[in-house]
Amino acid sequence: MCLHNHRPFAQSKIHHLLIQEKYSSLLAMDDKTELQMLSFEAPKIRLLRSLCIEGSDGMQVLDFAAFPKPEFDLPIFCANFFTTAKMNIIVLDLNPLHDIMDQEDYKEKYYKDLITLGLKYSKLLPWGGKLTSESLRFFSPIVIWTRFSSSPHNHSVLFSAFKDYYQAWLGLMDRSEGETDASQIACNCEAQHRYLTWRSEKDPGHGVLKRLIGEDLAKDVITKFLFNGVNELGNKTFLDYFPEYRCEDGKVNEKRSMIGKSFENRPWNARGEFIGDRVEIV
Ligand code: BLA
């Protein structure tokens, strides 16, 4: 995939303040696969980080995310591209910080003007089929969830989508003004902590990371680098946020999903209205 040869940071207005020097590159246990890590912060951004993996077998991964500071209720930028020689598994989104199913005003504020952009790319990169039902809570009406076989055409469409979505997010960031109300800041902080807690426990990429660098180091990379803040932004546990995962012995159920997979088709219509079945979490 061509993404690794480009420098999305260089085009942005982000101050290049490198943080977390501990992680810059790691060699996997096979002595061949390289993991490259970069992280930055900026006046409105708590953490912007990327993980690139170049496998010896043609596997390539880009896990790129940007988390706003708690003063901002901006969406979280999320680009997750997993590629093997043949297959690509793609999630590209401005993940909503707050619930868009119940909070119509949050949806209006950030997504109303982006529906056309979402529509353009959801036609070019069609819905990838059933997925972990719980993930839908973290996706926006403009999410690109797709799978395709590797081809220069597909990769160039994906690269355009990445640039356009990132540009859209940077635009939102430029226009956003920080909250001063302490309770709103606390609410943003908890929402981000909940998101970090979900992904550091249940992200589908964890298996690959563990296979590459071992369980302990993978856990370290997940909690201290990829989802940095999970141990600092709040005190609630995974089970506080997602009690449906509690086993009888009080431990977290290791299943990725309690509900199973659903949403065979894109559950948003062309106006960005949710048309899927509401998944009830009891
Ligand atoms: C599969 N990755 C998936 C799937 C999704 C995502 C939806 C389909 C399987 C499923 O339904 O869970 C991605 N899910 C996300 C994202 C969010 C979410 C981004 O909820 C955000 C809220 N993927 C990566 C990285 C690796 C990776 C870094 O992002 C590897 C290091 C691998 N993803 C990967 C693999 C699969 C996958 C191997 C297929 C295996 C599977 O289906 O479990």
Image (spheres, rainbow, N blue to C red):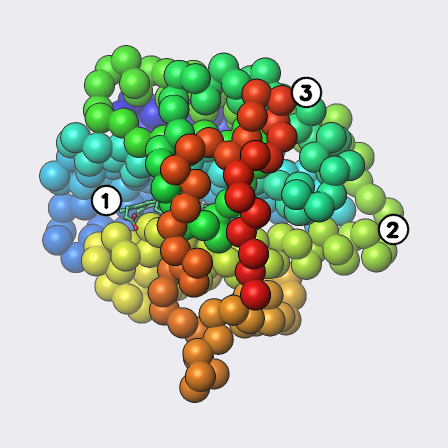
Q: Decide: is 68 above or below 110.
A: below
Q: Position of residue 32 (x, y in %)?
A: 14, 46
Q: Which amino acid, by three-letter code, is at mark 1? A: Glu
Q: Quadrant of the N terminus?
A: top left
Report which residue position mark 1 lands on: 34
Q: Which residue is mark 2?
A: 181
* Quadrant in the picture for the C terminus: bottom right
- Label 3 neighbour load within 10 Å: few <14, some 14-19, many 20+: few
Q: Earlier in the sequence, mark 1 or mark 3?
A: 1
- Which mark is nearer the camera, 1 or 3? 3
Horizontal side, residue 143 vs residue 170: left or right: left
Label 3 belongs to which residue? 113
Residue 22 appearing in the image: no
**Left or right, residue 12 beside residue 61:** right
- How crowded is the residue under tag 1: few (<14 C-alpha within 10 Å), some, or many (20+)? some
Dot 3 and dot 2 residues touching (CB under 8 Å): no
CA distance for labels 1 and 3: 39 Å
- Side of 96 relative to 157 (left or right): right
Q: Residue at x 31, y 31 (%)?
A: 147
Under circle 2, the secondary element is: loop
Whether residue 147 is visible: yes
Mark toward the viewer: 2 or 1 = 2
180 is higher (above) or lower (below) than 183: above
Q: Position of residue 165 (x, y in %)?
A: 53, 24
Q: Nearer the viewer, mark 3 or mark 2?
A: 3
Answer with the quarter of the image where residue 86 lies: top left
Look at label 2 and name its amino acid: Asp
Q: Position of residue 240 (x, y in %)?
A: 60, 71
Q: Measure how far apart labels 3 and 2 are at the Cα level.
A: 26 Å
Identify which residue is drawn at 69% across, 30% down. Answer: 110
Circle 3 SS class: helix
Residue situated furthest bottom in the rendering:
249
